[in-house]
Amino acid sequence: MSTGAGVQAQGEWRMEKRRIVALCGAALVAGLAIGAQAQGTRQAAPQKQEGAAVKGSLKDWSSAPGIKGLERPFEYLARTDLTALPLGRTDIEGDDVYVMISEAETRPPEQVRFEAHRRYIDIQLVVRGQEAIGVAPVAGLVSAEPYDAAKDIEFFATPRESASLALLSGDFAVFAPGDAHRPSLHLDGPHVSRKAVVKVSVAYRDRQRGRLPPG
């Protein structure tokens, strides 16, 4: 092989080596990016925890996350003609589970305070109409009115940041004790909303989950 051919071959080999290294580097970067994306996806979809509001549609209630122990109240809502129930309270299982039916016009946010409960879980279902519900974690709020044990309610000052759930007819939201909520807000203007609010005692829910003995 001539000297010129040898130099040319060496040059081609160096170019090929650089190309292989570049390809390997690109593959490594792509792999890291995919790994980071997967990690981000895992972090963005944590397992349902107590105190994080759940929203869903009544027709698909059984597939909603975080409702273990609430099956009986949801079965009641799904099979009952809620348009025919009288306004006010109807017992399902005494003080452990009962439903409150109301009809009222939605209100602007400045007229409604955030509230939360300690002994009861709320299942709020829009039977007819539509509304928005503000949501914020209790842990980050400032109490505006002390907890009233008789009414199981505490009111909070409006936080600088909060989320909002849009509920149409047939939609529900579940609020555990860690969820402050500001219900019955305007959604695309005022509406008259017929609602069913099922009050479920935390003790009942925990018994259904097998945490506490019956009694």
Image: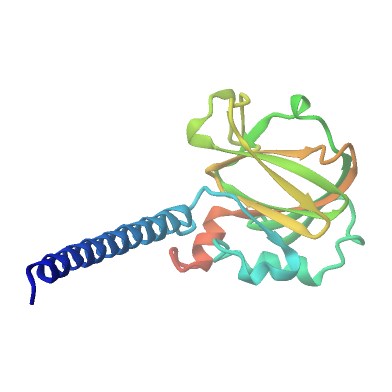
Residue drawn at the location 56% of the way across and 63% of the way down: 65
Left or right of residue 135, residue 126 in this image: right
Q: How many marks?
A: 0
Tell me the residue at 35%/60% (across/down). Answer: 30
Q: Position of residue 74 (x, y in %)?
A: 69, 66
Image height of 191 relative to 205, above or below: above
Q: Residue furthest bottom?
A: 1
Residue 174 rendering spot, x and y as whole percentages: 64, 53
Residue 35 at what x, y percent from top left? 35, 60
Seen from the viewer's position, the closer of residues 56 and 180 is: 56
Q: Report the front residue among 192 and 120.
A: 192
| Res 144 quadrant in image | top right
- The residue under the point 48% across, 35% down is 139
Q: Taking the image as drawn, is residue 215 in sight?
A: no
Give the colouring mode of the picture: rainbow
Percent across and percent down for residue 161 are 58, 30
Closest to the observer: 142 or 134? 134
Instruction: Please say if 66 is above or below 116.
Output: below
Quadrant position of the N terminus in the picture:
bottom left
Q: 39 or 55: nearer the eye?
A: 39
User: In this orientation, does residue 207 appear?
Assistant: yes
